[in-house]
Image: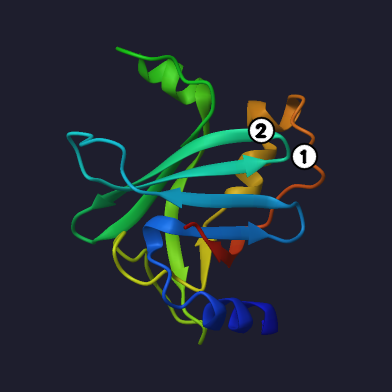
Amino acid sequence: MAFAAFAAGAHAACPQALAVYAEPASGATIEFRPLTQDSGFAVTNEFRLTLGRQPVEGMVLWTDDPARSVAIVTHNCPEGDVTGAEIEACMVWEGVIYALGADGAAGLLPPPDQPAAASLLLADFGRSVRGSAIYAGEGGLAAVPFDQFFLSGCQE
């Protein structure tokens, strides 16, 4: 908890679009980045998640009624027109990504231009990684990641 409070103070001015998070048990990291292009749907954030030596891509979509920041993490998905089965095969995790404040209060992921959350909770992330094809691969994954990532830096 002290780590989270220190990180939040040290990186308070960092926008969510440039935030870097770490999960201490496994060494997994999340690096947010500005959107590279207009995706044509409700993508608000993009990120790269590193699990061992395996970088995987992620994006955040917003749902309505109720509003939720839903993240999708994929690995080696085919390009172009794909079937539902092909997407399912390359899916590492899909779920709500919650922002946790320094006080522990849960909320939704901040927009890209707003200050970064002190930590993130990726609901059921570790279990999903354990059951995915990426875990069985040659990723150098030291441990199954837990579901909480702490703000650890800000990209320049």
- Seen at 69% across and 39% down, the residue is 130
Q: Nearer the viewer, residue 24 or 20?
A: 20
**Circle 1 sits in a helix, a strand or a loop, which is it?**
loop
Question: Residue at the location (48% across, 36% down)?
Answer: 57
Side of 29 where 105 appears, left or right: left
Callout 1, which amino acid? Answer: Leu
Label 2, label 1: how many angstroms apart (C-alpha)?
A: 8 Å
Query: Can you name the residue that lies furthest to the front here?
Result: 156
Quarter of the image with the N terminus is: bottom right
Nearer-the-camera pick, 102 or 34: 34
* Residue to which mark 1 is pinned: 141
Q: Position of residue 106 (x, y in %)?
A: 44, 75
Q: Are marks 2 and 1 in contact (CB under 8 Å)?
A: yes
Residue 129 x %, y % = 64, 40
Number of numbered callouts drawn: 2
Helix, strand or loop for disc 2: strand
In the depicted structure, whether residue 4 falls above or below residue 152: below
**Nearer to me, 89 or 54:** 54
Residue at which label 2 appears = 54
How would you rate the neighbour count of disc 2 (Cα within 10 Å): few for under 14, some for 14-19, many for 20 or more? some
Mark 2 residue type = Gln
Viewer-side residue, 15 vs 132: 15
Colour theme: rainbow
Q: In the rendering, at what x and y percent does residue 149 appear?
A: 60, 62
Residue at point 31% right, 69% down? 114
Where's residue 112, x and y in %? 31, 59
Left or right, 72 with respect to 146, comes to left
Ranked by sequence position, the earlier of labels 2 and 1 is 2
Question: Neighbour class for label 1 at 10 Å: few (<14), some, many (≥20)?
Answer: some
Q: Is residue 59 left or right of residue 102?
A: left
Q: Which mark is residue 92?
A: none
